[in-house]
Image (spheres, rainbow, N blue to C red):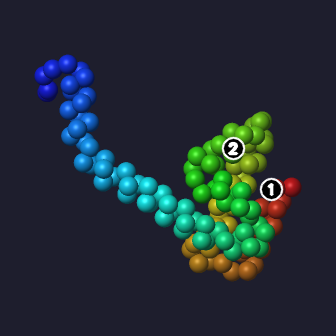
Amino acid sequence: LAKGSPLQVILYTVLKSLPFLLIFIPLLIKAVKDERAFFQRHAQPEIESGALTKEDVARLETFTGRIKARRSVKGHQAQARLHHLIRAQLDLVRLHIHGMAEPEILEAQRAFIQKLKA
């Protein structure tokens, strides 16, 4: 292992990993942007139909957004209900992603979401 003070070891480690980080961080940022654009593109028909709002999509497109939404409500039952709502909304968007956008399936899922929102 490296000899020297802990500060020297940390500095050496940072300098050795810098090329990797300079490549990895921009790729990670691009992947996140692409994933959000993909999700928004597939959620757009549901925004137009009124099943989802822009706020719903903003909450659904990131894992941290879903976690923050669940933590924002108080009580176990309210959190469980919101969890089911989020899952149902994600399932609705997944139907578009997987090309299973048959009208009767979509209507059933939309009705289920409206029931959970009420």
In terms of sequence position, does the residue under pointer 1 or pointer 2 come before the other? 2
| Nearer-the-camera pick, 37 or 107 | 37
Identify the amino acid type marked 1.
Leu
Identified at 73% across, 80% down, the residue is 103
| Nearer-the-camera pick, 43 or 8 | 8
Work out whether 88 lies above or below 77: below
Q: CA distance from mark 1 to mark 2?
A: 14 Å
Residue 96 is situated, as x and y percent measured from the top left of the image, at 62, 74
Q: Residue furthest bottom?
A: 102
Give the number of the mark in front: 1 or 2: 2
Say if residue 88 shows up in the picture.
Answer: no
Disc 1 element = helix
Residue beneath label 1, please?
Answer: 116
Residue 83 is situated, as x and y percent measured from the top left of the image, at 70, 49
Q: Residue furthest right?
A: 118
Identified at 55% across, 66% down, the residue is 37
Name the image quarter holding the C terminus: bottom right
The tag on residue 20 is none
Residue beneath label 2, please?
Answer: 70
Identified at 14% across, 27% down, the residue is 1
At label 2, counting other C-alpha atoms closer than 10 Å, the crowd grade (few under 14, some 14-19, many 20 or more) is some
Residue 70 is situated, as x and y percent measured from the top left of the image, at 69, 43
Identify the amino acid type marked 2.
Arg
| Nearer-the-camera pick, 97 or 49 | 49
| Nearer-the-camera pick, 81 or 26 | 26
Location of residue 58 by image quarter: bottom right
Q: Residue furthest top?
A: 5
Disc 2 element = helix
Say if residue 50 shows up in the picture.
Answer: yes
